[in-house]
Amino acid sequence: MTYKKKYIVSLDQGTTISRAIVFDCNASIIGISKKEITQIYPNPGWVEHDPIEIWNIQYFVFLEVLKNSGIDFSQISGIGITNQRETIIVWDKKSGKPIYNAIVWQCRRTADFCEELQSNRKFVKYVRKVTGLVIDPYFSATKIKWILDFIRNSRIRAYQGEILCGTVDSWLIWNMTKGKKHITDYTNASRTMLFNIHTLQWDNELLNIFDIPISMLPRVCSSSEVYGKISIKNKKNIINVPISGIAGDQQAALFGQLCVTPGSAKITYGTGCFLLMNTGDKPVKSKRRLLTTIVCGPRGELNYALEGMVFMGGAIVQWLRDEMKLIRDVSEMECFSKKVHDTHGVYIIPTFSGLASPFWDPYVKGSIFGLTRGVNSYHIVRAALESVAFQIRDIIEVMQKDYGKNINSIRVSGGVVINNFLMQFQSDILNIRIDRSQISEISALGVAYLAGLSIGFWKNLEVVRDKFLKTYKFYPNAYNIEREYRYCCWKNAIVCTRLWKNMNLKTYNFFYK
């Protein structure tokens, strides 16, 4: 009898790309398949995806990666799912068809409603206390409410038990199990602004305020267990493969970076940037508008983290290329940035989707400060890259104060981290060592670990820890005076940007009287 190797498959459903990645027992990547998904912009500030397309593409890349890798279904030990968080889908329980497009985490359509909620200080404090979040269109609750408010008869049908809702992981598992399982995990539930992160239950008071019936929400499970099985037919018979791990993309990345002890932190540089620091089995309440969220401990058990995010991270690269036409390819950014000694006093505030942590100001517009006759395209490109690092420092400053300890090193991943200039500048402006792993698909790796641990594919994380011995380290080498002067200029630019949205005739007359 011929021995067949076993593998773990990670399904990584992201904001712009759906991936399927195969890992072997050494946590090495055997194969990757990926495909872009369509971005839908019905109105300014609105972002949607087609749920049917999400499922079809995710299943397509799953089959494709197995075919291209020469792997039979019977060789799959387990499947892990990691996904774009906060994005919400509502579908018909009987037919399985969505009643509306997926409303994506980037969508700002509920900003006005969130502003109304923020006027109630008692409610703001309640949301912070129960969910660890702030009131913002970013999270799922107001998106669900919008669908129930504006899609005809949807709320009535929801209370009658005819429709269901969930984040992308719930939607994928519903389809994978042919409607047998309606579930999510703690990490995804904690991003909905409906979940009590202390009692680990859906919060009835929040459900009543948003007028969302609990019957439409998924059952909440741990991030590392067998939830159900996907049945796949091969040449001979039907193979039942367990779905054994779920985590939101940023929590999966934290686990993939092995940041499973208190004080360990990671940054993911993607479309946005996400900084998470594990705080152990007890939540740390932020006094400075960071988020308290659920993550995974070393065995996949529930832990907590402080989190801050930047809405415009790697997306500023696309802006420079597609809208500004200052670069033709991403690889040019590092070269252009090094052609000049500094930014010539230019600071770019890339708040195209508002300010996230720690300001949470959805109405701020992007701006450029310090333009003089000597500024050229290289200065603009460099200032754009530096803006990413400055936004991370805004978060680090408050995170260290909330946690009460300094961060000595941070692990990084994401498409932008190949830019050595940015990584060195990030280390300089933070005065913290940056560790860049050689492993690229960190979120997929993290959920592969979670899926593998639950079924005994790996005994514990120690058996794969050696994978992280090979990292490239960036050490800070900027003078303190220079570092603090540059950061002070950045903070001034932030203040001016936030003032701009509040300019009116009264302030105009003050300056021009």
Image (cartoon, rainbow, N blue to C red):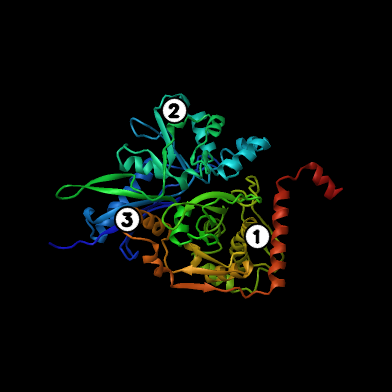
| Residue 429 on image: x %, y % | 63, 67
What amino acid type should be assigned to the residue bearing mark 2? Ala
Along the line of sight, the residue nearer the viewer: 51 or 169 = 169
Q: Residues within 10 Å of mark 1 (few under 14, many from 20)?
A: some
Which of pointers 1 and 3 lies earlier in the amino acid sequence?
3
Alpha carbon of mark 2 to alpha carbon of mark 3: how far? Answer: 34 Å
The label number, if any, that marks residue 158 in the structure image: 2
Determine which quarter of the picture holds residue 425: bottom right
Identify residue for label 3.
9
Along the line of sight, the residue nearer the viewer: 18 or 216 = 216
What residue is shown at x 46% (from left), y 31% (from top)? 214
Determine which quarter of the picture holds residue 3: bottom left
Q: In what element is the residue under mark 3?
A: strand
Which of pointers 1 and 2 lies earlier in the amino acid sequence?
2
Q: Residues within 10 Å of mark 2 (few under 14, many from 20)?
A: many
Q: Is residue 135 visible?
A: no
Identify residue for label 1.
397
Q: Is residue 275 left or right of residue 459?
A: right
Q: Residues within 10 Å of mark 3 (few under 14, many from 20)?
A: many
Alpha carbon of mark 1 to alpha carbon of mark 3: how far? Answer: 38 Å
Q: In what element is the residue under mark 1?
A: helix
Along the line of sight, the residue nearer the viewer: 476 or 184 = 184
Q: Is residue 307 left or right of residue 493?
A: left
Determine which quarter of the picture holds residue 452: bottom left
Alpha carbon of mark 1 to alpha carbon of mark 2: how far? Answer: 43 Å
What residue is shown at x 39% (from left), y 27% (from top)? 162
